[in-house]
Image (cartoon, grey):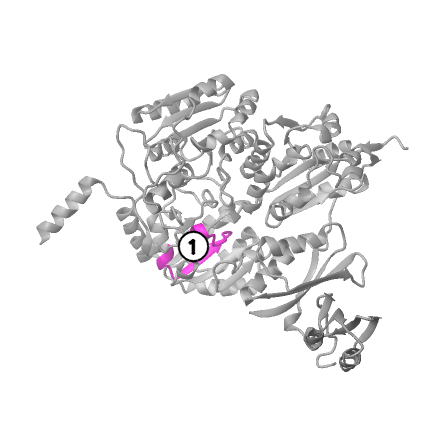
């Protein structure tokens, strides 16, 4: 089963997100992550869903999403060239001995320390899902206190091959 | 405030007039009392007071299915709204265009657990084509227009409009929009010509075609186009439960119903065909059994207006997304007449070897009742059926001649559907007899609508196939659960004929086969009130043929042969030895 990144444009109004989430639960589709926000047009919200499924399941998901009256556009970015980012906040246990090493790891991942206390450090990182997961893995031995992830957001690339 | 401003309630009534609504099926209550006040002097539209909100929705469905127009329901908030849920789910599964207006508590009370508050928008989100909460009176007229547009176009379906009490009391200028545009809703009517051409190639190369026809043909009013195609190709037609009536059941190319309780020969033909043209049907599990072995030798073409119906259950070779009528109009001129003589001869042989059958005797056989109703009405009545054995026998033995005469709950399988649906159908169609076929279980689920039928002098013939059991469940317990009958006996049934009389309807009861025709004839002469006919039928009779759930054609069980026939066959085989 492959992970698919699906970008959905939906009327930015009451209950519209519910229709999308409800569709996934009613039909037993899986959601790995979901993120929502307004788009360039404030009457349209952009929802990015990462879902796992066989090709025919994903095909059904896209058809069912297209059937929702409030949904104006659905794109499976998996078959396009696209950029994706996720933001994560990690609160790691830290003391005098470990703090420096944690901050070095953070630097390697080009992430930022945004809060510090005698017993913890909070790091903000953005990047692809893999990068974020790698950072989390590196921090695990120190003791992770809390994590908040936004889930993947993604946009289609304008020029094929451009970074 | 200008004098030509109207309240939300008045706007609702005016909008319904704009939509040419003839009937509202409804039930008043606190949250819609203002709406009902606006209906007080309403002309053009008749309000039908049902005796339960579920009855109102099924009546609206029956009306919509019989006429092709949008059925309209008005109920109050809370329990009034939740009582409509089964009917809405039913309409969703069977693509029935209805608009349900539900009352709601005033906007400032929403979310406060107010008296008679229910989140009907949340509850019905997954069983409606779309639903709306009207948050201010300014958007009411647009919303009503949108609701009717969504319900009746594309693949039809139910739409709920939730109307808070204060919104319906506040005022605005009334302008009913002429047209409506929604950027997320563009039903696609015209099939892609490239796909149509691919389909034509497959059809023209076929020797053993089958047209597998569903309710989409009825919804798109494409019966004539279907007949043209079948006649031009000389192709046999198998119909789904919802498709019955789309093609004349008495025509020589008709093979009746296919699927779990379909005819032996239609299932055999689908199993053997080399080209299966699915037209407005959706490869439902009751049709396909095991989808992996369904119609294994055929190239498959699928015409449907709903893209999500395509390749959902069975992969097809050529999908055509579009309205059935539009697609057939463009496809039929391109196909060649096929030489199907041998194929039709083979099917005729199967029809003779494995006809639909039952044994007649002094007891009343349910199949006999349906057959006699068919003969007496020449296949031209509107017949609603409930769910279970009564529904399957109706589907098998009533050869529907016309579309929109077979009204049944196919997808959801709602017991208690038949009778209230017949009430709606009887309002919609006055020039043909309306029969409601029921089991003795289902009739008790919405029997209160007898009041509605009597009050409106509807001459519906309510036939109860009364075998004292929840027959279909009993059949499964018989066949698959070692005959361990568990809570399927309805031994304490009431006297239905007396119930009918108490309601002011006519009542008949009999357990003799000889009485069936005389009673039906008497019933057909009663034109000023409903008639309830309690036919006490053979208690333990099973519906055959039957392909077990998820099974394949190889597992089909045909009607068990009579003792005599088995003995004759034995004698014959011994003589041969």
Q: Position of residue B97 (x, y in %)?
A: 60, 42
Q: Is residue B46 above or below residue B217?
A: above
Magenta span? B270-290
Residue marked by disc 1: B288
Depth check: B319 or A96 in front?
Answer: A96
Q: Is residue B187 visible?
A: no
Pick the quarter of the image with the N terminus of chain B.
top right
Q: Chain of mark 1?
A: B
Give the left or right position of residue A55, taking residue B37 as reference: left
Q: Position of residue A57 (x, y in %)?
A: 55, 63
Q: Is residue A39 visible?
A: yes
Q: Is residue B536 above or below residue B112?
A: above
Depth check: B532 or A150 in front?
Answer: A150
Q: Is residue B127 above or below residue A34?
A: above
Q: Position of residue B324 (x, y in %)?
A: 54, 52
- Please, what secondary structure does the residue beneath circle 1 have? helix
Depth check: B277 or B498 in front?
Answer: B498
| Residue B33 painted magenta | no
| Residue B285 painted magenta | yes
Depth check: B557 or B403 in front?
Answer: B557
């Amino acid at each position: 089963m492959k992970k698919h990144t699906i970008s959905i444009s939906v009327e930015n109004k009451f209950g519209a997100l519910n229709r999308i989430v409800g569709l996934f639960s009613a039909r037993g589709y899986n959601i790995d992550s979901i993120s929502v926000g307004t788009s360039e047009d404030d009457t349209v919200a952009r929802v990015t869903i990462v879902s796992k499924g066989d090709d025919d399941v994903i095909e059904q998901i896209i058809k069912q999403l297209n059937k929702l009256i409030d949904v104006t556009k659905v794109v499976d970015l998996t078959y396009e060239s696209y950029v994706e980012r996720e933001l994560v906040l990690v609160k790691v246990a830290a003391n005098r001995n470990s703090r420096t090493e944690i901050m070095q790891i953070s630097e390697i991942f080009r992430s930022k320390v945004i809060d510090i206390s005698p017993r913890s450090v909070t790091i903000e990182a953005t990047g692809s899902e893999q990068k974020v997961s790698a950072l989390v893995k590196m921090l695990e031995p120190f003791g992770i206190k809390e994590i908040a992830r936004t889930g993947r957001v993604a946009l289609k690339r304008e020029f094929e091959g451009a970074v | 405030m200008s004098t030509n401003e109207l309240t939300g309630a008045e706007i609702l009534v005016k909008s319904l007039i704009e939509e040419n609504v003839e009937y509202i099926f409804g039930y008043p209550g606190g949250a819609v009392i203002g709406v009902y006040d606006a209906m007080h002097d309403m002309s053009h539209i008749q309000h039908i007071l049902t005796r339960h909100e579920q009855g109102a929705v099924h009546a609206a469905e029956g009306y919509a299915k019989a006429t092709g127009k949008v059925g309209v329901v008005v109920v109050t908030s809370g329990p009034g709204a939740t009582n409509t849920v089964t009917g809405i789910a039913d309409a969703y599964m069977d693509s029935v265009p209805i608009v349900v207006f539900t009352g709601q508590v005033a906007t400032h009370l929403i979310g406060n657990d107010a008296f008679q508050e229910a989140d009907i928008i949340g509850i019905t989100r997954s069983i409606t084509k779309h639903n709306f909460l009207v948050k201010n009176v300014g958007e009411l007229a647009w919303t009503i227009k949108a609701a009717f547009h969504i319900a009746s176009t594309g693949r039809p379906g139910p739409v709920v409009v939730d109307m808070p009490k204060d919104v319906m009391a506040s005022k605005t200028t009334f302008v009913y929009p002429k047209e409506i545009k929604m950027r997320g809703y563009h039903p696609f009517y015209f099939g892609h010509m490239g796909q149509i051409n691919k389909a034509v190639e497959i059809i023209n190369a076929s020797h053993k075609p089958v047209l597998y026809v569903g309710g989409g043909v009825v919804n798109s009013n494409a019966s004539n186009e279907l007949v043209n195609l079948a006649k031009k190709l000389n192709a046999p037609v198998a119909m789904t439960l919802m498709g019955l009536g789309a093609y004349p059941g008495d025509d020589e190319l008709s093979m009746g119903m296919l699927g779990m309780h379909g005819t032996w020969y239609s299932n055999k033909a689908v199993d053997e065909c080399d080209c299966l043209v699915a037209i407005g049907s959706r490869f439902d599990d009751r049709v396909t059994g095991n989808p992996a072995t369904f119609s294994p030798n055929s190239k498959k073409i699928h015409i449907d207006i709903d893209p999500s119906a395509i390749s959902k259950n069975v992969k097809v070779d050529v999908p055509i997304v579009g309205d059935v009528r539009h697609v057939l109009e463009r496809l039929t001129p391109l196909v060649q007449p096929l030489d199907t003589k041998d194929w039709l001869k083979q099917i005729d042989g199967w029809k003779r070897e494995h006809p639909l059958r039952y044994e007649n005797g002094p007891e009343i056989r349910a199949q006999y009742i349906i057959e006699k109703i068919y003969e007496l009405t020449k296949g031209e009545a509107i017949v609603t059926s409930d769910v279970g054995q009564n529904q399957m026998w109706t589907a098998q033995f009533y050869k529907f001649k016309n579309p929109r005469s077979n009204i049944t709950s196919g997808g959801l399988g709602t017991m208690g559907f038949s009778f209230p649906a017949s009430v709606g159908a009887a309002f919609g169609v006055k020039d043909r007899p309306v029969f409601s076929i029921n089991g003795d279980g289902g009739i008790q689920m919405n029997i209160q609508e007898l009041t509605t039928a009597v009050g409106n002098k509807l001459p519906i013939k309510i036939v109860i196939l009364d075998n004292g059991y929840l027959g279909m469940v009993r059949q499964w317990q018989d066949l698959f659960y070692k005959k361990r009958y568990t809570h399927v006996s309805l031994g304490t049934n009431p006297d239905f004929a007396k119930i009918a009389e108490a309601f002011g309807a006519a009542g008949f009861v009999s357990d003799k086969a000889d009485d069936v025709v005389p009673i039906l004839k008497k019933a057909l002469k009663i034109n000023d009130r409903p008639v309830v006919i309690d036919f006490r039928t053979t208690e333990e009779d099973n519906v055959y043929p039957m392909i077990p759930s998820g099974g394949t054609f190889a597992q089909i069980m045909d009607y068990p042969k009579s003792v005599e026939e088995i003995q004759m066959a034995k004698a014959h085989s011994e003589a041969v030895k």
